[in-house]
Each structure stands twice: as structure tokens, then as C-alpha cells.
Image: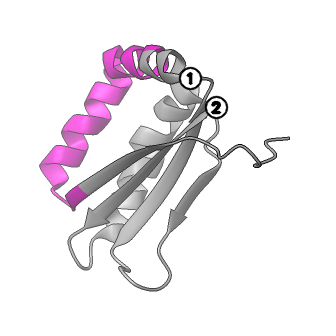
Amino acid sequence: MIYDHRTYTCRPGTIKKQLALYGEYGWPVQRKHLGQPILYASTETGDVNAYVHIWVYKDAADRATKRATMQADPAWIDYLRRSAEAGFQVAQRNKILTPVPFFNEG
């Protein structure tokens, strides 16, 4: 298993607008292609202009296949256009994580 941990930072005062935009246009198409994330959350303390999501894949090939299919979907392309036009996001950090040997995935 691999975990795709993503953190997005929004301009101050725009996170609710970004999440509403994503909820309407991004969430349905992303779940269609990637399945259910193990976490999708906004930051309560610290950088309160950020939100995080974590997706699980069998391996790097599974991730690449699913993301390529999503990137070709007209609904995802529409969401990306709307998000870029809105300009709420200012930063993105991605990390690919692998479980340590003693972690019980079941």
C-alpha cells in the first residue's frame, strides 16, 4: 500500500469557498476515479487556511493508472479550470507515504 498525502493552502478567507467549489465539482469525479479517501479534513489549529486529504493505492502503478484516468475525465478538467479561475489555492504539497513494517493495515 501507498498513501498519497496532499496538503493545499488557500488564501486567507477563501478556504470555505474552495471547499464548496471542490464539493460541487471535484469531489464527485475524484471519488469516481480514486475511491474513498481515508481522510479529507480542514486544519483546526496551526495553518487554518489549509486542508488535507489522503488517498490509498495498492502501489505506484495503481496510483498512476487511476490518476491518468481521472485527468482525462472532462468533469475533472472542468473542475481544474474552475479552481484555477477562482484562484483560492496558493500552495500544494504532496507526499507519498509507505507503512512501516509493524503497522497493521487490517
Q: Mark 2 points at which residue?
A: 1
Residue 26 against residue 87 in the figure, above or below: above
Q: Helix, strand or loop at disc 2?
A: loop
Residue at 63% across, 24% down: 58
Residue drawn 42% across and 14% down? 69
Q: Position of residue 72 (x, y in %)?
A: 33, 14
- Decide if residue 67 is on the left or right side of residue 40: left
The answer to which quarter of the image holds residue 47 is: bottom left
Q: Which of 14 and 58 is in front in this view?
A: 58
Q: Do the residues labelled 1 and 2 touch (CB within 8 Å)?
A: yes
In the rendered structure, the answer to whether residue 13 lies left or right of residue 97 reads left
> Percent from the top left, x then y, of residue 42?
48, 69
Seen as rendered, the residue at the extreme front is 101
Q: Give the vertical position of 16 relative to 24 (above or below).
A: below
Question: Which residue was labeled with disc 1?
Answer: 59
Q: What residue type is labelled 1?
A: Asp
Q: Between residues 101 and 91, which one lies in front from this camera angle?
A: 101
Q: Which structural element holds mark 1? A: loop
